[in-house]
Amino acid sequence: MTTSVTKTQLRLGVNIDHVATIRNARGGRHPDPVRAARAAAIAGADGITAHLREDRRHISDIDIDRLSREIDLPLNLEMAATPEMLEIALRHKPHAACIVPEKREELTTEGGLDAAGQTEHLRPFVEALTDAGIRASLFIDPDPIQLEASISLGAPVIELHTGSYAEQSNEAGLFRELTRIVNAAAMADELGLECHAGHGLRFDNVGAIAAIPTIRELNIGHFLVGEAIFGGLDSAISRMRAHMDEARARKSA
């Protein structure tokens, strides 16, 4: 089944993990990720993303509990495919749960999930989330093999890892990685997958991704929290929203 999303507004999911990182650096309750989620809603976010890691380095169990109870926007829980995280997801029943790769020693997510190589491991997680009414998604690299594996797993949504694109410093590299994302987003649409994207997106590089008509949602966090230091979280989100909308409008014109 192929769906047309050309005229659909691109959604912005704001990841609030690193508000919690700043809080945890000193302890206590400030700054409060839930307060950041409320501010994001006012500034134009369409959803809130939070990654509950095994080591709880930023978002905590209490944060997930409060976000589930206290915010009106859809909550996207990023989680590793472990029994502990599945139990937490099934208890809180967020709007969505995005399964991501997770290594204890990494500073941030370093690449996409190997859905093709972990099909048997991932299948019961996708099925359990779906049965509970939670929208299951897989965070994958823009690779046809991973897209086909996502379909075989029954995941209705994939999120394309844009980290390699964001790291490029020359035109050739940017073109190569952008082409991979464009092709993967088109293939996702042809397969009937809802396509999201995220990782490393900034004011200066989000336009080319936002202009891809078959991408429905971008999830952005670290850059926005960093920009908030200089101009406020509401300003950073509003500017990102404007960059996204302008790029989508130019593509649709």
Image (cartoon, rainbow, N blue to C red):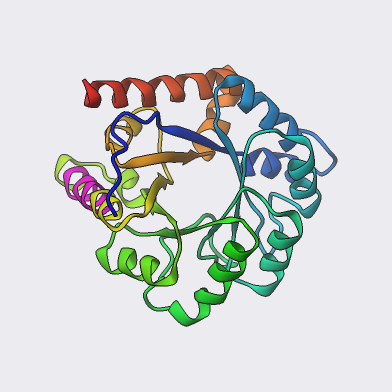
Residue 119, x across and y down, in percent: 44, 78
Span highlighted in magenta in the image: 174-184
Q: Which quarter of the rendering shows the N terminus?
A: bottom left
Question: In the image, 36: left or right of 202?
Answer: right
Q: Nearer the viewer, residue 96 or 220?
A: 96
On screen, residue 22 above or below 128 = above
**Count of marks overlaid on the render:** 0
Place residue 37 in its image quadrant.
top right
Q: Residue furthest left?
A: 172
Residue 184, x across and y down, in percent: 26, 54
Residue 244, x across and y down, in percent: 38, 27
Q: Residue furthest right?
A: 28
Q: Residue furthest bottom?
A: 120
Q: Residue at x 35, y 33 (%)?
A: 206
On screen, residue 137 above or below 74 = below
Identify the main secondary structure in magenta: helix
Q: Residue at x 52, y 54 (%)?
A: 108
Q: Residue at x 66, y 50 (%)?
A: 94
Q: Residue at x 37, y 74 (%)?
A: 116
Q: Which quarter of the rendering shows the C terminus?
A: top left
Residue 62, x across and y down, in percent: 81, 49
Question: In the image, 119: left or right of 18?
Answer: left
Place residue 92 in its image quadrant.
bottom right
Please say whether residue 138 is one of the residues in the magenta stretch. Answer: no
Question: In the image, 184: left or right of 200?
Answer: left
Q: Nearer the viewer, residue 214 or 192?
A: 192
